[in-house]
Amino acid sequence: MKKLNKIDSVCWDIYRELYKHSTPAADFDKLVEEASINERGQKVIDFMAYEISVDEMDAIIESELNKHKFTKLDRQIVRNTIYFGCSPKSNYA
């Protein structure tokens, strides 16, 4: 359970950085706080309204991962969570 909490914490840190560097820039914590709730009780964030370059997104993810001692598997779990989660849409600009 402790490891999962650390992974979740790192993912939240990455989301904060991604949205801070997206266009338009946003405060991820505020987006979550003000998010509407869907019929399944989940918070809905309009992540497609924000955009970040693939290179910048990858650099942010790797920078955050390098701050922690994760196994190769845990690093991939974090990447997958970010890529398939509510990160801003990415472009190849």
Image: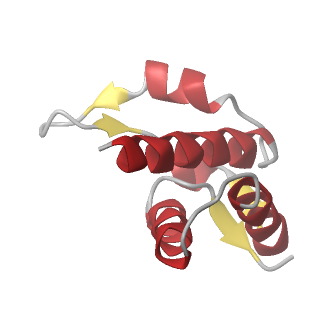
Which residue does the image show at 82% across and 46% down from the upper left? 21
Which residue does the image show at 51% across and 74% down from the upper left? 76
Outermost residue to the left = 40
Q: Position of residue 32 (x, y in %)?
A: 47, 28
Which residue does the image show at 17% across and 33% down from the upper left? 41
Front residue of 49/57: it is 57
State whether residue 77 is above or below residue 7.
below
Please tell me in which quadrant of the rendered image residue 62 appears.
Answer: bottom right
Front residue of 4/18: it is 4
Q: Position of residue 34 (x, y in %)?
A: 46, 20
Give the colouring mode of the picture: secondary structure
- Figure quadrant of the C terminus: bottom right
From the viewer's perspective, is 3 left or right of 17? left
- Figure quadrant of the N terminus: top left
Q: Position of residue 7 (x, y in %)?
A: 48, 50
Which residue does the image show at 62% across and 55% down from the upper left? 88
From the viewer's perspective, is 22 left or right of 83? right
